[in-house]
Image (spheres, rainbow, N blue to C red):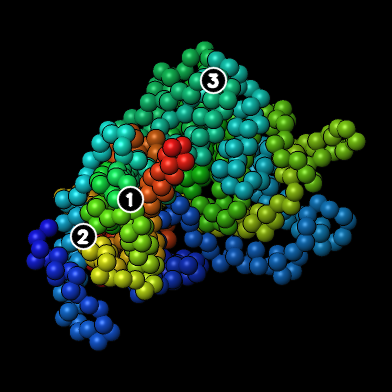
Amino acid sequence: MSSSLHECCLKRSEAIRNEFPMLSVVENGHPMVYFNNAATAMTPKSVINAMTEYYEEYGVNIARGVDAIGYRATHLFEATRVKVADFLGAERSDSVVFTRGTTAALNLVCSSFGNLVVEAGDEIIVSGGEHHANYIPWQQLAKNKGAQLVLAELDEDGKVTPEALQKAMTPKTKLVALFHISNVMGAVHDVKALAKVAHDGGAYFVCDGAQGIVHDQINVVETDVDFYAFSGHKLFGPTGVGVLYGKYDLLKRMPPIEFGGEMISLVDVYDTTFADPPHRFEAGTMPIAEVIGLGKAIDYVNRYGYCAMQRRVEYLTSIAVEKLQAQPNVTIYNPHNYASGIICFNIEGIHPHDAAGIYDREGISLRAGHHCSQPMMRELKQFATLRASLAFYNTEEEVERFVEATEMAGDFLDILF
Amino acid sequence: MSKQRKWQVISLTYSSNQSQKDNSANAQLFKKIIMDHYRNPRNKGLVEDDEYVTIFLRNPSCGDDLTVQVKANGDKIESIRQYGTGCSICCSSASMMSELLASKTLTEAAQLINQFYLMVEAKPYDEEALGDAISLQGVAKLPQRIKCATLGWKACEEALGKIQEEQADDSASK
């Protein structure tokens, strides 16, 4: 790289980092290195400001009454629905339901739609690489209905190939629920091909987009998924808000699972007619500030661009993998999956929690444990692993500090003294 | 463990005017003790014996799990077994617990468990009573690791409770 280009990149990187207040936090006396982005990403100032503005200028309830200030809140809330629909490539905004997050979205599909269509003797296909949020709901539904939970086989990258899904399909398969990108292995699914296999076999296709939404632009129409779920806080937005996209005709068939305000059409003495989707599924006061914040996070991603973000994530992940691989005692379980920014690894002879203590001392935030995916830990034959997950705002220097801390991991008892 | 080392551990004192050198010597000694229990765990491995009360505990957030078995004869603990997977703090602590509490009375054991809790919560405690377990006193400044250090002790505490319940039931039915 020429020096002027290098300088230009550094300046740009600095400007980006300044937009994220959390990136200047000091942890244990060191500038924090945040490598836990797959758990929750940092939030830019524009998102924080939009939420503050709501609370300071028009922080009232939505869709109630006819006052101007209430109209402003309602308008911005509903405008975000349109923004989300555009972001997902959805044809209509009323196929976007706001939820508390991916977990709530997947539980909604399962409790309402799953409960409606799955019968005794049916089969539900998931994979061993699912997050618990896309595993337990289906496991419990199968158990309650007398249906069978079937695990599609994972390849060595930790993903289900269309061929493997085909192999798992039977005439009894009613529904397939798979991740878009795995939160442990960072494997990327060919969502379009998998949805086609499911549909060709007469099954519905549910996609957990919690990680996928961050790294791989989804088009729900092109991929033809029936449902797609994601969270705001992994997409540089606020916590407490997420989205369930569903094909409108399917949403229309689904009964509500929560009852209360704003989800009704007519409440009679002994019966109630429910509102149409999406409001049918949004009972009570919604996280209004968070929805508005999510809209700003989408603006942020659109402004930066998936392509530029991904180039950065893949570049940083590739150098981190290369440097870790140079250490003889490090085992990387997903050495080929750069796209997610996720590096799943262990240091020989050192328990992940012991190693995490050293990273923490050095001001490096990453994840140690089973990553809410005990089935995946069984596949890896590990009790727990370390997981570093990088975002576009991370830097080469941070990767360097992470690698240096890895070299110190053997001194894990030092943190006690 | 050699008598020599046991004596060293018990005789350590921690006054505020302790020199830097002593601190670092303590740290080295404590690290050695912890690693010794981690690499050569005491009373490791479970037994199939109805006379043992078995308690399984886990830290769901990190995946550590631990089984502790306690056998009592009247008021006295006869044997403690432990087996599990976890980090160095969790495993070494369970080993230290099994060594310290075996052969104590149920009341003494309960008091020692309480002393250990006080230590990791940075409260005043009887350091002479805790044997090797005082090497884990640094956990007091790592609140996020208290749950690792106390897992084995909690399992034993539960086992003691169960033993006392069973003994009460037995004497009631007699």
Q: Nearer the viewer, residue B158 or B83?
A: B158
Q: Earlier in the sequence, mark 2 or mark 1?
A: 2
- Residue depth check, mark 3 versus mark 1: number of the one nearer the observer: 1
Q: CA distance from mark 3 to mark 2?
A: 49 Å
Residue A394 in percent (x, y) is at 39, 61
Residue A295 placement: quadrant: bottom right
Left/right placement of residue B50 relative to residue A136 reads left
Q: Amino acid at mark 2?
A: Ile
Q: Secondary structure at mark 3?
A: loop
Q: Which residue is mark 3?
A: A147
Q: Amino acid at mark 3?
A: Ala
Q: Chain of mark 1?
A: B
Q: Residue at point 58% right, 57% down?
A: A238
**Which residue is outermost to the top?**
A171
* Residue B34 disc label: 2
- Residue depth check, mark 2 versus mark 1: number of the one nearer the observer: 1
